[in-house]
Image (cartoon, rainbow, N blue to C red):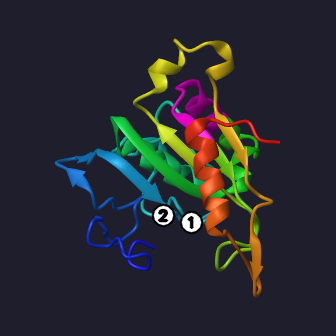
Amino acid sequence: NMWLHGYAAEAKIAGKNSISEPQFKEKDKLKRFDFVVANPPFSAKSWSNGIVPVDDQYRRFQGFGVPPAKNGDYAFLLHILGSLKSTGKAAVILPHGVLFRGNAEAEIRQNILERKWIKGIIGLPPNLFYGTGIPACIIVIDKENAKIQESLPPEKQGVFMIDASKGYVKDGNKNRLREQDIHKIVDAFNRQWEID
């Protein structure tokens, strides 16, 4: 995506399996970043190949829980959280199911929410991405402002959620966000607008 959209010169891109062979390391630890933008593979069935999650040398699952063996969405999200500085921010595109699936994923989701690292969730329309027709969402992470949340009035605390699933246009057999849809999402998120 970075190459396709003309940002490859500014990005750091490396191949291999991010979970079993992280490419961005400092000594024996994950390298920490200020910003991460990611579109990991949806619901990877063999995400744990090459590692034993409970003995993960990078401690990505410690204190959160281990994602299900047949669904790696939270494995990638926990890898990203482990790769952020304490002041880091991220935007991660994941399947919509990460918002409501139960069992191990519910436990992981609760542990992340309790840390107040999720600033917002943007629900997207279905059929936006090639290779899948399922709806997706953008999870917006803000570690830096997690502590600030506690000092805010109750109505300003929590996760800001946007249902942007209706703002799109059909484009052949796919759906596409128009510039106006993108601007509405960004403005609503940045200004924390309540829109019916």
At 69% across and 40% down in the image, what residue appears?
A: 161
Q: Where does the magenta region start and end?
A: 107-120
* Residue position marked by numbered label 2 in the rendering: 49
Residue 107 place in picture, x, y as percent: 66, 34
Q: Amino acid at mark 1?
A: Ser
Answer with the quarter of the image where residue 11 lies: bottom left
Q: Confirm whether the magenta stretch covers residue 109.
A: yes
Q: Confirm whether the magenta stretch covers residue 72.
A: no
Residue 79 place in picture, x, y as percent: 44, 49
Residue 21 place in picture, x, y as percent: 34, 62
Please tell me whether residue 192 is drawn above or below residue 114 in the rendered image: below
Question: Does the CB distance between marks 2 and 1 fall below 8 Å?
Answer: yes
Q: Whole-Å distance between the Cαs marked 2 and 1?
A: 6 Å
At 56% across and 33% down in the image, what residue appears?
A: 112
Task: Say whether residue 31 is left or right of residue 45.
Answer: left
**How crowded is the residue under tag 2: few (<14 C-alpha within 10 Å), some, or many (20+)?**
few
Q: Amino acid at mark 2?
A: Asn
Q: Secondary structure at mark 1?
A: loop
Answer with the quarter of the image where residue 70 lies: bottom right
At 43% across and 49% down in the image, what residue appears?
A: 80
* Residue position marked by numbered label 1 in the rendering: 46
Nearest the viewer among 156 and 91 is 156
